[in-house]
Image (spheres, coloured by chain):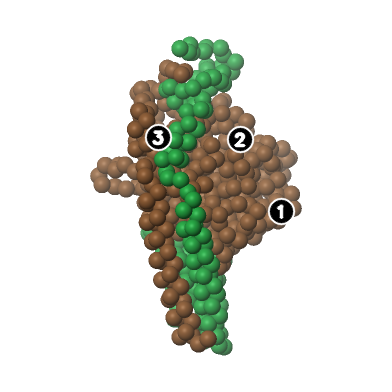
Amino acid sequence: MSVAELKERHLAATQTVSALRDQLKQKRLLLLDTDVAGYSRSQGRTPVSFGPTDLVCCRTLQGHNGKVYSLDWTSEKNRIVSASQDGRLIVWNALTSQKTHAIKLPCAWVMTCAFSPTGQSVACGGLDSVCSIFNLNSPTDRDGNLPVSKMLSGHKGYVSSCQYVPDEDAHLITSSGDQTCGLWDITTGLRTSVFGGEFQSGHTADVLSVSINGSNSRMFVSGSCDSTARLWDTRVASRAVRTFHGHEGDVNAVKFFPDGNRFGTGSDDGTCRLFDIRTGHQLQVYYQQHGDNEVPPVTSIAFSISGRLLFAGYSNGDCYVWDTLLGQVVLNLGTLQNSHEGRISCLGLSADGSALCTGSWDSNLKIWAFGGHRKVI
Amino acid sequence: MMDMVSSSEANNNEQNARNPTTTSSSSSSPLPAVVVSSSSSSSLRGGETRHEPRPLSGIGGVGGTHPGFMGKHRMTAAIGYLDQQIQIIQEELDQLDTLGQSSVVCKELITSIESVPDALLPETKGPVETGWDRWFQGGHGSRNRKKWI
């Protein structure tokens, strides 16, 4: 076939894809007879109502000398690992505020960190394109530094996010600026699967975030600069199970909903969204003007343990607490007493759901918990 | 998708095949000197910058002994990719015929949320875990508990 004929075929195929996409969008709209907020109101649900001293900052973890970029809790209750621009990981006991480890990283440009399910290792990744594993029980070297116990190499771009597969210390999933996600066997140091990649049905721009389904660890979602989120089955690396359109900017954060059947996203377009994985429906958009007509990007999200609350950090320092059912902001942690003095870059909920940790560009981490009067229904 | 195809058309030289789309928005800032990645899209996350757009080269390709051939090769691959996308979207369209409306899912969502005790809510289903209040206990093992109603 000549180049001209190929160009024609290419153009025709592009137009077909575009037309089909529109058709899909329209057909989906017809199925969206209601969003979550509309339905919840019709069922008589009212917004969560917080008193002024209900959610309080009960710890401030100080120790980093630079912006905090990432944090992760252990699966048991109280420990957190955080990663900072200062080129260190710190492991904290959040209850006592003590630091149990301060790990100087071989590559200072870290973007993400994760705690292993057993709490014995931590992983981190960043601009070195490598995911490094540290065993917290290892003896330190002559300089007092914890040695790297494994390096997971293979990505051709920065490692933006990493998460251990629940219930096992041996596998981890990464997302990367090379447009792919990876599943790694930590024991061998080898990449078992590459999700996406050139001409595979994967992301078409940097992947910024991953979240593994807590109810079914074979499924994970990824969020990307291509404005989509994709659902993957770890057994099928060649194509995403489903692609979720809707956002109008980079999808910076993705997080599975506690029941494992939905997930949330946060984006540069200033919105958070809730998607259903089985139907693909976009169930709700969470958007509120922040004042001064600004639409700050969402940097990070987390759900409370029931899913009733969605915590969203924004680049302007706000941290909205959304009532996921009513689609309303019920609190702004960013304006509470004792709040951070900079952008909130990362958020995470403790394993038992009793506390939220926020990490900020002000170099601190803060722990928030419910200190008010609780009514048990 | 169109961005990816047009940039792969444009990238008929021997450079890295990965091309970022231009969907993101951020001002550029200098990259740290330690960047070792071969990806064109390396940049600091955290909002400082996303990536820098790659310079586009001509459709005919630059360098290489047979620029026309390289163009055809890439274009054929791109068409194959588009055909795959068409198939995937068609499958999804067919699936939609069997899918329920969003209200069904919303109902499930409410049930799911209201079945789980949540320490951060002012009103929640029980049972309450004793550890929820540990953040407000003075010393370790202090037994200054709140009363529940």
Q: Colour of chain A?
A: brown
Q: CA distance from mark 2 to mark 3?
A: 28 Å
Q: Residue at the spot x=65%, y=53% of the render?
A: A235
Identify by letter the chain in green. Answer: B
Q: Quadrant of residue A158?
A: bottom right
Residue beneath label 1, please?
A189
Amino acid on which disc 1 is placed:
Gly
Taking the image as shown, residue A83 lies to the left or right of residue A54, namely right
Instruction: Work out whether residue B48 or residue A181 is closer to the camera in this orientation and state it.
Output: A181
- Chain bearing tag 3 is A
Q: CA distance from mark 3 to mark 1?
A: 42 Å
User: Do discs 1 and 2 share a chain?
Assistant: yes
Q: Residue at the spot x=52%, y=16% of the render?
A: B138
Residue beneath label 3, please?
A325
Amino acid on which disc 2 is placed:
Thr
Observer-side mark, 2 or 3, equals: 3
Could you say whether the residue bearing mark 3 is in a helix, strand or loop?
Answer: loop
Taking the image as shown, residue A355 lies to the left or right of residue A141, namely left
Could you say whether the residue bearing mark 1 is in a helix, strand or loop?
Answer: loop
Taking the image as shown, residue A89 lies to the left or right of residue B136, namely right
Residue beneath label 2, please?
A74
Q: CA distance from mark 1 to mark 2?
A: 22 Å
Residue A12 placement (x, y as % from top left): 43, 75
Compare marks 2 and 3 and give the one earlier in the sequence.
2
Residue B15 placement (x, y as % from top left): 54, 74
